[in-house]
Structures are given as structure tokens and as C-alpha cells.
Image: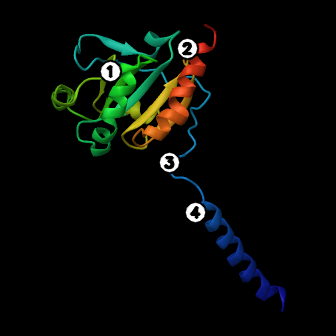
Amino acid sequence: MSLKHLLPLAAFLLLVGLLAVGLTLNPREVPSPFIDKPAPAFSLPQLHDPEKNFSVADMQGKVWLLNVWASWCVSCRAEHELISALAKQNLAAIVGLNYKDSPMDAQRWLKRYGDPYLLSVSDIKGDVGIDWGVYGVPETFVIDKKGIVRFKNIGPVTEESLQQTIIPLIGQLQGEGA
């Protein structure tokens, strides 16, 4: 066989190999460029009190979660019970980032399903979500006491992700510098 005939075969085998590796990856584990970097700064109006703003700097010195949600998001409803249960444990404050939603719809949704958040902010245009690298809702970030993003959960939080990753990480981060 000549080199001319081996080249297409080699290219084909390389493509098959790359496809095989790609199929073993978990699409929920998209690497975030923000892991181990400072949380992107923002200042947004609070959902329940639009005269007051909230910023990342307000959480300095605390371990906290940023949960990106919306009233129109079916998956957000699916994870809401777990987020509420986590909030009741008081392991860390949970801040809601209401994404591309009307404040009235968001408030109605929280009234209907319960409000697990320390507070929620309104990201009506989605600019903060873009700054945080949000692919879609829901997404949840764990931020340490120094304001560094330590974990990103893409999609709805599950019992497994809570028990195996999020809660142990919160415990570890709470113990650092205590």
C-alpha cells in the first residue's frame, strides 16, 4: 500500500479515536474557566427589594452558592426541592440569580414553590449570566470565603451531586481559615 492510500486510513482512524474519547465524556462536566478564579463581579437589584443592590463583594468572608434559576425553567422546578432542603441545613448562604425572567413571574414562582434563597437578584437581560459563563439554567456555583469559584454544577442539582460533591466541598471550605 502506498502512502497515498495510508493517509486517508490514518485520518479515518484518528477521527474514530477522537469520537470514541468524546463519547466517554460527561456533557454535564463542561470545564468552567472560572474554577479557582475570582467570581465575576456584579451589582444587581434584589428581586424582592429592587431599591437595594447585591454584589459579590457583599459575600466576602462567607462560603456561598449562586444558583441560577428562572420561573420558565422546567429543570429549575425539578431541582428546587433539593435547593430548599440544602438551604434548611444552613451550611452556606444560597443566593439566587433570576435569569432572563420578569421579576413579577419570579416572585410569583417563589411564592408558589417556596423561597430558599438568602436573596435573589434580577438578571433580566442575562448579562451577568454571560459574565459567569452560564450555558443555561439551572446552574449552581460554589464560592469560597475569598470570593473564588470552587465548583460549577451544570444542569439541575441532584441528590448525588449534593451528597458527593457540593456538601463535602462546602464543609471543606467552611473549615478553611475558620
Q: Pointer 4: what residue?
A: 23
Q: Which residue is mark 3?
A: 28
Three-letter amino acid code at the position of disc 4: Leu
Residue 134 location (% of width, % of height): 43, 38
Dot 4, crowdedness within 10 Å: few (<14), some or many (≥20)? few
> Could you tell me the amino acid type at mark 2?
Lys
The residue at the point 58 percent across, 19 percent down is: 173
Query: In the rendered structure, which amino acid carries the disc numbered 3?
Result: Arg
Q: CA distance from mark 4 to mark 1?
A: 37 Å
Q: CA distance from mark 4 to mark 3?
A: 13 Å
Q: Secondary structure at mark 2?
A: loop
Which residue appears at 55% of the width and 53% of the height? Answer: 26
Q: Quadrant of residue 35?
A: top right
Residue position marked by numbered label 1 in the rendering: 117
List x then y, in percent, for residue 121.
Answer: 31, 22
Regarding residue 146, the answer to whether it shows in the image is no
Of all residues shown, which one is farthest toward the bottom?
A: 1
Residue position marked by numbered label 2 in the rendering: 145
Of pointers 3 and 1, the one earlier in the residue sequence: 3
- Give above or below for 148 relative to 35: above
Q: Specify which label sits upstream in the sequence, 2 or 1.
A: 1
The answer to whether residue 86 is visible is yes
